[in-house]
Amino acid sequence: MSDLEELVGRARAGDRGATARLISVVERRAGAGEPIGIADLWSARPRVVVGVTGSPGAGKSTLVDRLVGAWRTRGHRVGVVAVDPSSPFSGGAILGDRVRMQGHTHDPDVFIRSVATRGALGGLARSVPEIVRLLGLVGYDLVVIETVGVGQVEVEVVGEADVTVVVITPGWGDAIQANKAGIMEIADLFVINKADRAGLAETRRDLVAMLDLGHREPRPPILETVATSGEGTDAVAEAVVALAAELDDRGILKSRVAARRRRAVERVIVDRVLRAAADADQAVWAQVEAGTVDPGAAADALLDALEIAPGHGARGGSSDE
Ligand SMILES: Nc1nc2c(ncn2[C@@H]2O[C@H](COP(=O)(O)OP(=O)(O)O)[C@@H](O)[C@H]2O)c(=O)[nH]1
Ligand SMILES: [Mg+2]
């Protein structure tokens, strides 16, 4: 048995240290575009993957902490991947998320991992899906991806979820901002958190008006919570699981999963082609830099010169640590 397989066995048995080590391997290899080398990882999947997105400070981590508690009492093993926009060196928000989820630090059936955005060098979109799969492989049936829905990459990352929860707060403009960032289109469920604050009715009205303009089917429900007190959070936990079942019944989940699998392959292709092109005919690149060739002609010349072998630019298949 390889070291990695042995770790998978221990992680399945509830050894969170083993899960953490596996995730580090997956993160590094996926981030570098290398084959992961863990058997069955590709086809592994948690039963439900939940994306939770919204502005910084909206209360996502506080809400996720409540959801984890609710799902644990219903017997789920829960994984959380918190995509953290803070620098890995400041540690500030990572620490904050840990503190907010610390109620679960002694529960072997809860696994929480922060993934720093900075320093990920675009590897985020590749590593997060693999981490989610890994958590599925070792038996976490419900996995949450928490991410700030700002950049393109974050929106793409949350696209890895089966069910997407968008968290907004009362106050002028939050719903409108969500709309601008393109996260209205990916929401399956809206949560207006901080329902203890002023402006709740107006925010709900803005949201309803925006949903009236769109054609989301099924229409996303709007729930209200006070994550700090836990008010309304059980209802969100139940609604998420119910929505996943509904999307599954309608065949929507199946097509989302299929599209996601295609995207994973597309990312590898783009990576390999770009890397191979960068190594190709340097005379053409010199012309490109000098501005003496038009982009279409340069691309034709470079693509003609490419030899894209299997695994080109990456290491071979199945080496272990
Ligand atoms: N008043 C109020 N504060 C909340 C609520 N939920 C979270 N908070 C506070 O909002 C701040 C940001 O919460 P956090 O969960 O870290 O937000 P995130 O950045 O979206 O993950 C913290 O100080 C929380 O205690 C709520 O429902 N009501
Ligand atoms: Mg957070």
Image: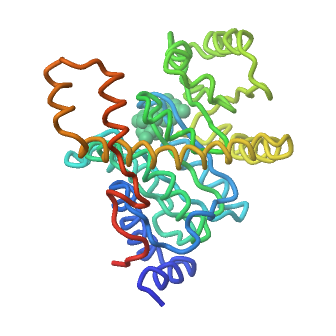
Seen from this angle, which residue lies furthest right? 249
> Splitting the image into 4 quarters, where does residue 166 fall?
top right
Q: Is residue 55 toward the left or the right of residue 296 in the image?
A: right
Counting from the top left corner in percent of width and height, residue 36 is at: 43, 66
Counting from the top left corner in percent of width and height, residue 191 is at: 63, 30
Counting from the top left corner in percent of width and height, residue 22 is at: 42, 71
Q: Nearer the viewer, residue 303 or 274?
A: 303
Q: Classify the position of the C terminus by image quarter.
A: bottom left
Above or below, 116 against 198 in this view is below
Q: Residue at x 82, y 43 (%)?
A: 251
> Splitting the image into 4 quarters, where does residue 118 fall?
top left
Looking at the image, what colour scheme do you see?
rainbow
> Splitting the image into 4 quarters, where does residue 55 fall?
top left
Q: Nearer the viewer, residue 316 or 154?
A: 316
Q: Is residue 57 toward the left or the right of residue 119 in the image?
A: right
Above or below, 304 against 95 in this view is above
Above or below, 159 against 168 in this view is below
Q: Residue at x 46, y 53 (%)?
A: 101
Q: Is residue 55 toward the left or the right of residue 297 in the image?
A: right
Q: Nearer the viewer, residue 127 or 138?
A: 127
Counting from the top left corner in percent of width and height, residue 30 is at: 40, 57
Count of numbered tags: 0
